[in-house]
Image: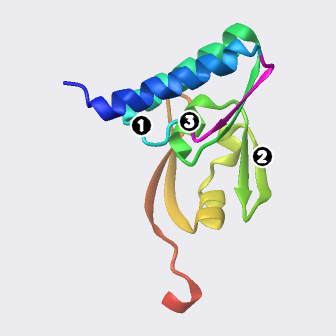
Amino acid sequence: MKNSSAFRRSEQQKVLLARALAQEADVLLLNEPTSNLDLRHQLEVLGIVRSIVNERGIAAIMAIHDLNLAARFSDHLIFLDKGRIYDAGEPAQVLTQENIRNVYGVEAIVSKNSGHPHIIPIAPVPTMGER
């Protein structure tokens, strides 16, 4: 049985995408398009965005905090730290152990899965006071 609230949120996200497309914009601006969605609906929404970008030849600019979803569905990433660009480029170039440690303060394992970086967070990096 489907989780009805997750299903409703997913449908709301799809309606918002349809509205944006009706305006025939050259760029989609998406702020956390997968927030409050379960895993299945996150994949569905981002799959729709990817299809729209490919079929219509438009750009999608997306703010997203899930690094694995960003790695899988993005062609280019801009990594921000304190509101400034820390690094930019293809996901494999940007999503490194060093960058994740420096920006998020987290030790992580970065591997490849289906050609995309896959991040496994391990532990917070101790701060000066914790050492």
At a point 65% along the width and 63% down the height, the residue shown is 103
Determine which of the numbered discs, if any, sits on residue 33 in the image. Answer: 3
Q: Nearer the viewer, residue 38 or 103?
A: 38
Q: Quadrant of residue 127?
A: bottom right
**In the image, which residues are magenta?**
25-32
Tag 3: Cα neighbours inside 10 Å, few (<14), some, or many (≥20)? many
Query: Residue 17 location, x and y as percent?
Result: 60, 22
Q: Quadrant of residue 26?
A: top right
Farthest residue in the top direction? 55
- Disc 2 target residue: 88
Image height of 41 relative to 31, above or below: above
Q: What kind of residue is marked 3?
A: Pro
At a point 51% along the width and 28% down the height, the residue shown is 13
Determine which of the numbered discs, if any, sits on residue 131 in the image. Answer: none
Tag 2: Cα neighbours inside 10 Å, few (<14), some, or many (≥20)? some
At a point 60% along the width and 14% down the height, the residue shown is 51
Distance from the alpha carbon under mark 3 to that under mark 1: 9 Å
Query: Residue 99 location, x and y as percent?
Result: 66, 58
